């Protein structure tokens, strides 16, 4: 019985590989599945800090335990290992640097190996995005966070310290990417210059908005402005907030200050993604070489780090909507790889059933020595500790359950991260068996350039 099942699965996998033009036996993976100059697309979407526990919780809250998310539309998956050369748990900037260059680096790295220039797995001293730009691909960097966030910025910026935000922003603007969509206006304008979202913080006097315009970017500041130019512009800079497009604070702070989870004028990550695809698809480079998009939902990490359960659900819902945009594009364009990994599990989020209770946990109090909210292990209800429990979406029988969100820590954990993929060469994720953080680069590079780097699969 087991042998028969194995044969059936092998036949189905071979048929799927033939249909998508992917390599057949893993041992032959060093042979390109397409000519190097054939048009192909890659989308790397990084929902920062979102591990399987987060996705399971989101599924229960958003669609119910028997339904499926857009994230579940990515059929190939494998465990993901995130360790760095000097740590078991990746940092956001160290993890992004590994994704961008395909080699292990120190945890405190941003486009460098600490302070040293990186030779990427390809042998070039460039990131995969920089190689794609040089090779003539249409490229986009998309994020709900500040323009200096490493999930996208580390693909085009190399600095010795993560706090060098002025230099990071400058390198992103001058990277040559065709579409750049994010927050972070404060790092694009000099001190004393007031922009659409607030005053600049640059001490060097550079006005990077003016620099972007001189480089040919159409600059937009709101969802409406982005939608208005998506059908005509070919090079766009979107600047949608002074910092992040969201307010990552504990529920008590947002409630006291009357702040929303996300600024209402800023496009969601799904809206940015759809606009970027529309803009890039009209670019002649897309039909000559292809499209390469690096996208990140940052709120999926920041809200859990602040033990804000509702914010983490809202961020996850937005990330899942972006997966819907990308999955639809892959289904319409089978020469496209969609690949994802979270690189950590922020906060160690879990669900705890709370039947028949009116309030969850004890209200959090501000007792820190510096006036900080206590972020120790706690239970969250719909508006933080001491509030009503969440209610799951109905299952197939219409049942719903009360639950709390349990947090383990305000930090990022190495806790069962998975990589998932859909489309061209997505099968490589499962053929690897375990996807190291360096393998994200390898699979993307193979899809873009037709060359498998490193040891062949066995």
Image (cartoon, helix red, strand yellow):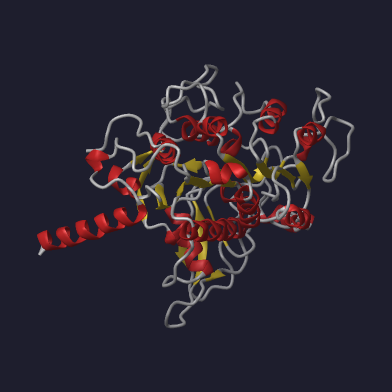
At 24% from the left edge and 39% from the top edge, which residue is drawn? 28
| Residue 133 visible, this orientation | yes
Looking at the image, residue 446 lies above or below residue 384: above
| Residue 433 visible, this orientation | no
At 61% from the left edge and 44% from the top edge, which residue is drawn? 284
Looking at the image, residue 270 lies above or below residue 238: below
- The spot of residue 118 in percent (x, y) is 49, 21
Q: Residue 436 is drawn in which quadrant? A: top left
- The spot of residue 140 in percent (x, y) is 61, 42
Q: Is residue 403 left or right of residue 169?
A: left
Q: Residue 104 is drawn in which quadrant? A: top left
Q: Is residue 182 left or right of residue 205?
A: left
Looking at the image, which is closer to me, 403 or 24? 24
- The spot of residue 134 in percent (x, y) is 56, 30
Looking at the image, which is closer to me, 302 or 195? 195
Looking at the image, which is closer to me, 250 or 100? 100
Looking at the image, residue 170 lies above or below residue 450: above
* Residue, far top: 116
Looking at the image, which is closer to me, 395 or 287? 287
Q: Quadrant of the N terminus?
A: bottom left
- The spot of residue 58 in percent (x, y) is 51, 62
Q: Residue 7 is drawn in which quadrant? A: bottom left
Q: Is residue 248 left or right of residue 438?
A: right
């Amino acid at each position: 019985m087991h042998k028969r099942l194995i044969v059936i699965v092998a036949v189905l996998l071979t048929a799927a590989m033939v249909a998508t033009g992917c390599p057949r036996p893993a041992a032959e993976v060093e042979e390109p599945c397409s000519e190097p100059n054939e048009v192909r697309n890659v989308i790397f979407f990084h929902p920062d800090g979102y591990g399987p526990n987060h996705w399971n919780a989101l599924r229960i809250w958003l669609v119910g335990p028997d339904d499926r998310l857009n994230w579940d539309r990515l059929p190939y998956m494998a465990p993901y290992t995130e360790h760095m050369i000097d740590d078991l748990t990746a940092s956001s900037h160290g993890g992004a640097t590994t994704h961008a260059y395909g080699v292990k680096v120190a945890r405190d790295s941003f486009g460098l190996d600490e302070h040293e220039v990186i030779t990427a797995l390809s042998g070039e001293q460039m990131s995969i995005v920089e190689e794609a730009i040089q090779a003539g691909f249409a490229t986009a960097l998309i994020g709900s966070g500040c323009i200096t966030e490493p999930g996208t910025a580390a693909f085009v910026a190399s600095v010795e310290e993560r706090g060098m935000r002025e230099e990071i922003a400058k390198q992103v603007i001058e990277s040559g990417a065709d579409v750049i969509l994010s927050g972070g206006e404060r790092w694009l304008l000099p001190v004393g210059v007031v922009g659409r979202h607030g005053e600049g913080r640059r001490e060097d006097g550079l006005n990077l908005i003016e620099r972007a315009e001189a480089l040919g970017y159409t600059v937009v500041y709101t969802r409406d402005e982005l939608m208005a130019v998506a059908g005509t512009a070919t090079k766009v800079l979107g600047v949608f907030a002074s910092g992040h497009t969201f307010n990552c604070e504990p529920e008590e702070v947002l409630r006291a200050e009357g702040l929303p989870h996300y600024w209402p004028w800023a496009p969601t990550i799904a809206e940015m993604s759809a606009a970027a695809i529309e803009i890039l698809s009209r670019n002649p480079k897309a039909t000559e070489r292809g499209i390469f998009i690096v996208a990140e939902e940052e709120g999926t990490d920041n809200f859990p780090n602040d033990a804000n359960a509702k914010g983490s659900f809202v961020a996850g819902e937005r990330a899942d909507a972006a997966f819907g945009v990308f999955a639809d594009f892959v289904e319409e364009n089978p020469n496209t790889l969609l690949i994802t990994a979270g690189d950590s599990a922020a906060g160690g989020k879990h669900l705890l059933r709370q039947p028949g209770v009116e309030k969850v946990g004890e209200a959090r109090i501000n007792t820190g020595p510096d006036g900080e909210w206590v972020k120790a292990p706690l239970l969250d209800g719909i508006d933080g500790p001491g509030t009503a429990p969440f209610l799951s979406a109905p299952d197939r029988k219409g049942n719903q359950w009360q639950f709390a969100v349990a947090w383990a820590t305000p930090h990022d954990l190495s806790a069962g991260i998975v990589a998932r993929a859909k489309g061209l060469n997505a099968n490589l994720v499962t053929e690897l068996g375990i996807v190291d953080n360096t393998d994200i680069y390898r699979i993307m590079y193979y899809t873009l350039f037709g060359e498998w780097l490193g040891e062949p699969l066995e």
